[in-house]
Image: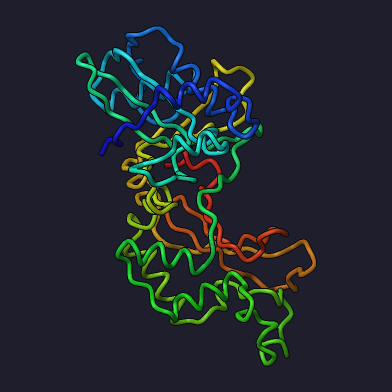
Amino acid sequence: MALTPIDDIHALQIQAGTLGRNEGHKFEDEIANRINTIAYPFSCQVLPAGHVFTGCPALLLLSYVGQHAGFTSIPKATAISTGALATSEEGLDWLSVNGVEVKKCKSDLVITLHDANNNLATYGISTKQCNNPTPTNAQLYFTTARAFASLLVNNEIAVSERAVRSLRQFCGDEGFRPEDDPPSMVVRETDPRRYFWEEIDSQGREEWEAIFGDRQDHVTRLLLQKAYMDDPFIPEFLLHKTKKADEWISTEVAIYSIDELVGLSRNYGGFRVKPYRVNKGSYRDPVGVEHHAPRFGIVQMQRGGQAQHPTQLQFNLEAGYFYKI
């Protein structure tokens, strides 16, 4: 369902100021600026079949969203880079719904289409970008084991405490690590800071595998759309810059509605594990040891492992998924 428009005039005034210079939001800022400055009415491009296109990202996105909304010609459109807005004090004042301050949202862009009668329909866009010569994994969701379980429970997917415990083992939360359980350390030759997927509590693991298998569409949709509580900008489309582009007007992008992406992800594959080994770092696997990396559809799941947030739970979009699905 289209989002309820907020005050985009004020937002555009803010965006035209210092916010557009934020280094972390250049891609979204450029798209928003192009959409806001092109001549209207805009004739939607007739896009070829599929989801991967080459051209100007702003015009491709506007055409894709416009066609999904039933437009062949768009009388007027406005776009807001919400990431830039949310990084400023003034932006936070604007990102308010019924007096409730909104500090975070899953959509990086919000596009409002105006029809001939000036009726408005507003859509949230999630963006991903890769600036390497070849596609890499794209981070989708970053959280804790307990917070992820709460996300599911709050959206009517039952998760037992035993399953939460097993996921905390997978992440290496304090109190749930092999090094917190001396008997497990007697013969352990692998990383003592966490349990791997094949090692976590078996009943908890089976519960998670059933959830990812039976409720795959629901979980995938939550990861794509429902990162924050009371989010007024839930994404309805995803725009992914696939790799480094030499020129803006010849950028390769993949574009999907969230409904399309959820269905294509399910068709690509159900729950499975991919064997892997730890061959670098402080705790390299002994010869013959192999671990299981859980994944479902185009979504990969792993322990974060970063120095700053080592025990976070991380979900990624598989590298190059847009070529495979």
Image spot of residue 21 (x, y percent): 63, 25
Image spot of residue 129 (x, y percent): 56, 35
The colour scheme is: rainbow
In the image, farthest residue toward the front: 99
Residue at 45% across, 34% down: 94
Position of 246 with respect to 37 (left or right) is: right
Image spot of residue 262 (x, y percent): 35, 47
Residue at 35% across, 38% down: 236
In the image, farthest residue toward the right: 282
Specify the quadrant of the image occupied by residue 106: top left
Position of 223 with respect to 260 (left or right) is: right
Position of 148 with respect to 50 (left or right) is: right
Frontmost residue, 20 versus 204? 20
**Relative height, residue 224 to residue 240 (above, below):** below
In the image, farthest residue toward the bottom: 183
Position of 101 with respect to 275 (left or right) is: left
**Relative height, residue 21 to residue 293 (above, below):** above
Question: Quarter holding the N terminus?
Answer: top left
Specify the quadrant of the image occupied by residue 269: bottom left
Specify the quadrant of the image occupied by residue 282: bottom right
Frontmost residue, 135 versus 21? 21
Question: Quarter holding the C terminus?
Answer: top left
In the image, farthest residue toward the left: 117
**Relative height, residue 107 to residue 149 (above, below):** above
Image spot of residue 297 (x, y percent): 42, 53
